[in-house]
Image (cartoon, rainbow, N blue to C red):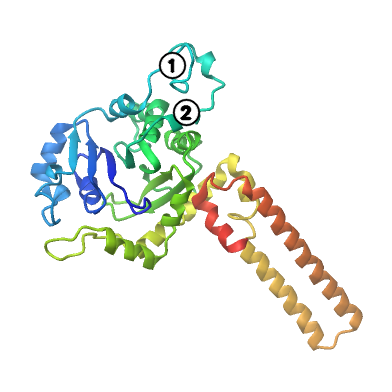
Amino acid sequence: MFTHEAPKRVAIIGGGEGATLREVLKHQSVDYVAMVEIDEMMVNASKEYLPYSSDCSDLIGSSESCMDDPRADMYYEDAMQWFIDRFSPECDCSSGQEHRHFCECGDEAYTSLDPKDGHERIQGEFDVVIMDALDPTDDNAFTEYLYYNDRFLESMFDSLTENGVIIMQLGDSIDLDDAHDAVNGFHTRANVIRVLERYGFESFHVYDEDHCGFFYPWSYVLACKKASCRQNFYRNEAEVNVAIHNKMIRTKSGRHPLKYFDGFTMGMYQTPSRPWQESFCRNTTNSQLCDLGFYNGKSQHDVDEDLNMLSHVVGNYRHHNISDAIEAEFFNLETKVMNNMILLKRSMEERIKTFLGKFNPIFARHLHHIF
């Protein structure tokens, strides 16, 4: 919600207990929230037995239950079909122009189409979409069907406005020694980011959160249609705290509306955990990035330390009046190493440019300190 500059319209998929709706409604900019939950019985049971999850009684201008807030509409429907019906254009099999490749007119006619082509013709209406349904790591047939349904994932992209943001749960956080999801059985989770990238999201941010009450840290991926969202995502602690003060609805009690989130917490989200970085490197398609030394082997900091040590050694030789020939040899060696490092940096910068925006959260901040 803070990554988008001023979200007005938000869609929530799932979240039947109402906690996600409660947090969204705390933002002053929000005019409308569509909550699409297939299980009306669970929503009613939560209102009766878990009222604190959907308690908006302390928010000025809201209702006792967040479900009854005038800004919220409840849809007790299948979210997949709800999004497809609204944001997946009808097929025109004769021209192939109205939909990118889901027409049931023969796959061969659409295999050469760019999956990103045509998005500009679809007018999205949500600034933020929050996926609070099944995690991609859940072991059941519907989960796989949901996250491998390209038409559904594409319709969520098309439901977003030009600067829209989507956030999805990824399941329990990975450990440092876990294999990449593509080979460790969590192929559904591995597919999520691949598909989101395929349809045109420009910036991806993976982070862990351990205050969600799941007895284990949980992982999330935030994806932006435009890379410009990074300006908000990477705001410093003070800037985030100012945004919280300016954008949150005041409470009747005078208490702070947010229990866990502040500028410091946002800073922890801005760089993925070491296990996620290692997992990224274990995917062979990312080996070029890792071979450059951003994750494994010598980092730029290590190389700089080596250069400092070399300079220190040369200085000691000079201090002890070692012969001019030896001093000159070390000076030449130092010069060669430094020149080679300059060339290496330039080469790395050129090689890395092609990857900028591909998987931003892991290396973009490293680049900021190097180039």
Badge 2, how many Cα within 10 Å: few under 14, some, many 20+?
A: few
Res 77 quadrant in image? top left
Q: Residue at x 43, y 36 (%)?
A: 192
Q: Amino acid at mark 2?
A: Gly
Q: Position of residue 81 (x, y in %)?
A: 29, 25
Q: Position of residue 220 (x, y in %)?
A: 38, 46
Specify the label residue 5 is tagged with: none
Q: Nearer the viewer, residue 344 or 353?
A: 353
Q: Which residue is mark 2?
A: 118
Q: Which residue is mark 1?
A: 103
Any part of residue 192 in sight: yes
Which secondary structure lies at badge 1?
loop
Quick one: label 2 or label 1, which is nearer the N terminus? 1
Q: Amino acid at mark 1?
A: Cys
**Quadrant, the C terminus:** bottom right
- Asked whether, in this view, residue 59 is left or right of residue 222, the answer is left
Q: Residue at x 46, y 56 (%)?
A: 271
Any part of residue 175 in sight: no
Which secondary structure lies at badge 2?
loop
